Image (tube, rainbow, N blue to C red):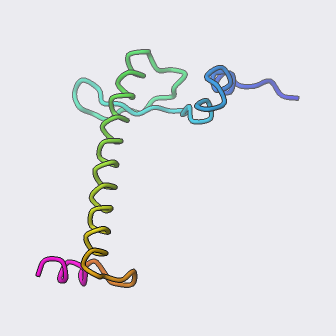
Amino acid sequence: MSTPTLHQSLQKKIGSCFGEYLPTTIKFQDRFGNTMEKPILDATLDEIAFSIQTLGAESSVIHCRRSSLERLYNLAREHGCFGSDTVNDIAAEVTK
């Protein structure tokens, strides 16, 4: 039986719900706006906070993109479009 790595031990300590999602590397913006990537075991607590901010911004963009697609889907269905219609066809229909 092998000894768990430090990362695996951290995952276990965080718990079964979230531990499996603990990344091995983090990304964050440095003070000059450059995207940095660093192994999590070498990261400072401040860098973890910056990574949380970066993920929050990415999450907001994903949420907006998802909402936009959902609104397009609902608009198309309201206008009687079919699942096989292309967005080009849908746009022509809903913008009449």
Q: Residue at x 61, y 29 (%)?
A: 19
Q: Residue at x 42, y 22 (%)?
A: 48
Q: Residue at x 27, y 62 (%)?
A: 71
Q: Is residue 23 left or right of residue 77?
A: right
Q: Quadrant of the N terminus?
A: top right
**What's the magenta region?**
88-96
Name the spot of residue 10 as percent of width and height, x first: 63, 21
The image quarter in which residue 22 lies = top right
Name the spot of residue 32 as percent of width and height, x first: 22, 27
Main secondary structure found in the magenta portion: helix
The image quarter in which residue 37 lies = top left
Between 11 and 6, which is closer to the camera in this rendering? 11
The image quarter in which residue 89 lies = bottom left
Q: Is residue 95 left or right of residue 85?
A: left
Q: How many marks?
A: 0
Magenta stretch: includes residue 21: no
Q: Residue at x 80, y 24 (%)?
A: 3
Q: Quadrant of the C terminus?
A: bottom left
Residue lying farthest to the top in this orientation: 45
Name the spot of residue 76 as percent of width and height, x first: 27, 75
Q: Is residue 2 above or below residue 60?
A: above
Q: Is residue 21 left or right of residue 31?
A: right
Q: Is residue 25 left or right of residue 28?
A: right
Q: Is residue 90 above or below residue 42?
A: below
Residue lying farthest to the right in this orientation: 1
Q: Is residue 24 above or below residue 61?
A: above
Name the spot of residue 93 as percent of width and height, x first: 19, 83
Magenta stretch: includes residue 90: yes
